[in-house]
Image (cartoon, rainbow, N blue to C red):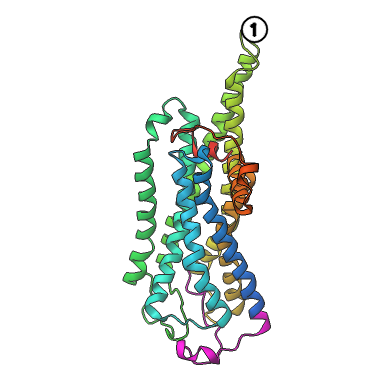
Amino acid sequence: MCLSWEENCSLSPAVPSGFGNVSHIHISSREALVGTILIIVDLVTFLGNTIVFICPALEKRLRTVTYMFILSLATADLLVACLVMPFSIIYEVTGIWLFGRLFCKVWISFDVMFCTASIVTLCFISLDRYCSVATPHHYPKRMTRRRCILMTLAIWVYSSMISFLPVMQGWNEIPGVDFDAERECIFVTNRTFAIVASALAFYIPFLIMCTMYFFIYRASRLKAARIMSQALDIHYHPKSKRQNSLQLENKATRTMSIIISVFVLCWLPYFVFNVYIAVCGAEPNNNAIHLVFKIITWFGYCNSTINPMLYAFLNHDFQRALKKIIVCHLGKTNSLSEPNYNWSFVHRGAVGQDLA
């Protein structure tokens, strides 16, 4: 997601652009190497998030009501791989924007929308986790399938409202500042837009997530203290399901905390630098700033690559589904298939528990 006009400033070679002149574009060995690495990142992102959609079809334990939050996250990451990364790779390798002014705006809008949807979905997941931990008895009634669908739709409507609407209306532009649409695709943003968009897309959801996970941590510690006191009771059975429940809660919270932390590490540098540039300003032709923006932007894109890997390594149900995919691919389903579990589409607690 690019919210600063400095990100894609002119680093293009002085050659004519357009589809008719593609043959005149010179690509150095360094650019070819960078392009190859970025293509690999794009393919891994696409394949990883595609597996997130396939897994519920093979593993019934993943078919939960709140799993649609995970699907929303995977949708955003998959769309980044399909509609953002490829054009960014072409632009990075050739140094020329080949797709015209209109699609430049569309591409930037996609960029902002999908990345915003990703972090807002994580924000909703933290709220879902808090409801599960704070009010476990009322959670199944509160988090219904219909409510989850409405919340997911709200995520995407919110994301589109702070991406397509302002970009297409030109609210981000600076009067008198323009670029060569035949060669460049630059997200020109004024100071107000950069600060407001960054706050809506990252800082406010980030603060909500931090608050929710603080409350989750505190609730988990209180629950642990209650269970410890029960363990001292002579009538307390050591194999009580409450102890297993606590272990699941702690593991689920730990799993989601890792996912949130990775997201913050990927995107925080970009948004901090973006606001800094908007407030303090920078030289338009500063190549160092251009390079930093490119690196931290792709570092943010890599979060879409990492999320499916976190699910695969931290979730036993995902690992089971991945084994089934591999078995089907190798044509050994009959000899290596697992027992058929009779699970229905019901609540199993919060999304965090599904990831445990």
Q: Which residues are magenta?
A: 3-31
Q: Residues within 10 Å of mark 1 (few under 14, many from 20)?
A: few
Residue at 57%, 52% (x, y): give it: 307
Can you give x and y, in whole percent of width and height, for residue 265 in the image?
60, 55
Can you give x and y, in whole percent of width and height, for residue 27 in the image?
61, 85
Q: Which quadrant would the C terminus be assigned to in this image? A: top right
Residue at 43%, 71% (x, y): give it: 107
Q: Is residue 268 visible?
A: no
Q: Main secondary structure of the magenta part?
A: loop
Asked which secondary structure carries label 1, the reply is loop
| Amino acid at dot 1 | Ile
Is 9 one of the magenta-colored residues?
Answer: yes
**Height in image: 226 above or below 17?**
above
Residue at 35%, 55% (x, y): give it: 157
Can you give x and y, in whole percent of width and height, for residue 89 in the image?
55, 74
**Height in image: 110 above or below 133?**
below
**Height in image: 300 above or below 176?**
above
